Image: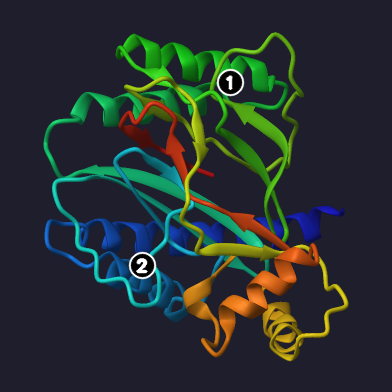
């Protein structure tokens, strides 16, 4: 890739980042007791489009022991209570993705846990340079979280970003590792510490509202065929059930999942039921 092309690509990443920063700031101000989760998620996605971007994935709103992949259903009426809220937002411009997350403590009881993830993110960003290893980054993240008296979530991590792909190598661990790939100039990565007062692992929960198209597969069910055409617009990026036509939607999704056409993103919860905080920056 030539220098001119690199600058064009970087410009799109910067544009996505600018949109994300504006949308995230506005969304955080709407996260308050009594607000409807679905309205916040739709606000994030609508504002992203109005500002010239597209959602890189459905707005994630994960509460308390939930760590990731929670997004409201189409008819969800749930409101925020005294929750520990993780707001994870992705924006892309022409496929170039910015990914960021913040934790909002509506209870006023988990400030130290929120600070643990934020301090880990700040410490990791401080050492990012051409030639740093992902193992070094993981060690800095783990040390910052443990210094606050919490555990890093060991089976969640930061990640690389590529065009129309929000999770590529390298993996950026949240714990120390003796070996790991070295970051180099022009790599684009999302640093994403998770801290918890639980056991430090997540497991899949029962709720499933987010999917991603892996590849088209031959299917006989008419609704599944129609849905495949609809999903082409997302270019492989994750999508929410609530974005799709509702007629026989569960049948179509089940058919495509069984055929191996879809990737499922069930909600991830802290294995021991502990509270989870998150901070992320691209």
Q: Position of residue 47 (x, y in %)?
A: 38, 74
First in residue order: circle 2 vs circle 1: 2
Q: Position of residue 235 (x, y in %)?
A: 72, 71
Q: Position of residue 199 (x, y in %)?
A: 41, 20
Q: In the image, is 75 to the left or to the right of 77?
A: right
Secondary element at tag 1? helix
Question: Can I make out residue 269 in this image?
Answer: yes
- Locate residue 220: give its quadrant: bottom right
Please give the residue where the numbered disc 2 appears in the rendered image: 41
Residues packed near mark 1 inside 10 Å, few (<14), some (14 to 19) or many (20 plus): many
- Numbered mark located on residue 137 in the image: 1
Q: In the image, is 56 to the left or to the right of 88?
A: right
Say which residue appears at 31% left-offset and 71% top-offset.
76
Say which residue appears at 81% left-offset and 53% top-offset.
3
Say which residue appears at 59% left-offset and 13% top-offset.
176
State the quadrant of the C terminus: top right
Image: 247 above or below 8: below
Secondary element at tag 2? helix
Q: Nearer the viewer, residue 14 or 84?
A: 84
Q: Nearer the viewer, residue 126 or 98?
A: 98
């Amino acid at each position: 890739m030539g220098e001119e092309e690199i600058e064009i690509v970087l410009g799109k990443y910067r544009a996505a980042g600018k949109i994300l920063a504006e949308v995230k700031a506005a969304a955080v101000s709407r996260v308050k007791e009594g607000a409807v989760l679905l309205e916040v998620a739709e606000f994030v996605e609508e504002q992203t489009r109005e500002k010239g971007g597209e959602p890189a994935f459905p707005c994630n709103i994960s509460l308390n022991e939930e760590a990731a992949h929670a997004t409201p259903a189409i008819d969800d009426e749930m409101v925020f209570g005294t929750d520990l809220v993780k707001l994870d937002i992705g924006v892309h411009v022409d496929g170039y993705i910015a990914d960021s997350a913040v934790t909002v403590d509506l209870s006023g009881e988990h400030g130290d846990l929120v600070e643990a993830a934020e301090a880990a993110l700040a410490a990791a960003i401080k050492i990012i340079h051409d030639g740093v290893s992902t193992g070094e980054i993981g060690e800095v993240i783990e040390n910052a979280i443990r210094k606050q008296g919490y555990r890093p979530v060991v089976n969640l991590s930061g990640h690389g970003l590529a065009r129309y792909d929000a999770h590529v190598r390298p993996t950026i661990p949240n714990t120390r590792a003796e070996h790991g790939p070295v970051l180099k100039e022009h790599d684009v990565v999302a640093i994403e510490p998770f801290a918890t007062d639980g056991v430090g692992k997540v497991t899949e929960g029962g709720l499933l509202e987010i999917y991603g198209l892996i590849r088209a597969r031959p299917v006989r069910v008419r609704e599944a065929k129609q849905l495949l055409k609809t999903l082409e617009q997302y270019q492989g990026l994750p999508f929410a059930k609530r974005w799709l036509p509702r007629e026989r939607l569960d049948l179509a999704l089940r058919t495509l999942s069984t055929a191996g056409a879809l990737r499922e993103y069930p909600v991830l919860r802290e294995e021991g039921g502990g509270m989870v905080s998150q901070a992320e920056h691209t």
